[in-house]
Amino acid sequence: MSLHFFERVYALVQEIPCGKVATYGQIARLAGAPRCARQVGYALHANPRPGEIPCHRVVNRFGFVSPAFAFGGAEAQSALLRAEGVEVSGDGKVDLGVYGWRI
C-alpha cells in the first residue's frame, strides 16, 4: 500500500466523531479500497500522530478492540473509548449498533 493510502486512512479516522467507532473494513471502503481492511490496520499501527489521529476509534468487524493496539494494547484502547463515553464490555466488545459511526 502506498503512503497516499495511509494518508487517506488517517484523514478518514480523524472524521470519526468522539464517542463513535468505525471498523477497519468501513475505513477501507471509504478510502476506496474495500478489500484492504488489514492495510488499514497496518496504517493505524504506524500512526505518526497518535494524539491527533484517533486510531483507538477503529475496531474489528465484530466490534472488538485490538489486542495488538499499538499504543498500549486492548486495555489502553478500551480505556480511551470509555473516556469518550463508549461502553466496552469486559471481553473488549463495543456495540456497533449503538456506537458505530454512520455516514
Image (spheres, rainbow, N blue to C red):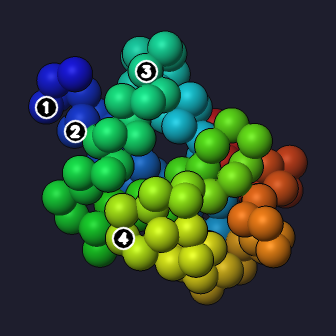
Q: Give the spatial CA distance, label 1 vs label 2.
A: 6 Å
Query: Which residue is found at the position 55% from the left and 59% from the top?
Result: 67
Residue pointed to by mark 4: 71
Marks 3 and 2, Cα distance to the nearest angstrom? 14 Å
Q: Which residue is mark 3?
A: 36
**What number of labels is visible?**
4
Which class describes the residues within 10 Å of circle 2: few (<14), some (14-19), or many (20+)? some
What amino acid is at disc 1?
Answer: Leu
Dot placed on the residue nearer the N-terminal end, 4 or 3:
3
Q: Position of residue 42 (x, y in %)?
A: 32, 40
The answer to whether residue 40 is left or right of residue 92 is left
Label ID, residue 3? 1
Under tag 2, what secondary structure?
A: helix
Q: Quadrant of residue 36?
A: top left
The N terminus - image quarter: top left
Residue 23 is marked as none
Q: Disc 2 designates what residue?
A: 7
Q: Which badge, 1 or 4, is on the more N-terminal residue? A: 1
Q: Is residue 86 above or below residue 59?
A: below
Q: In the image, what residue type sits under mark 3?
A: Cys
SS at badge 4: loop
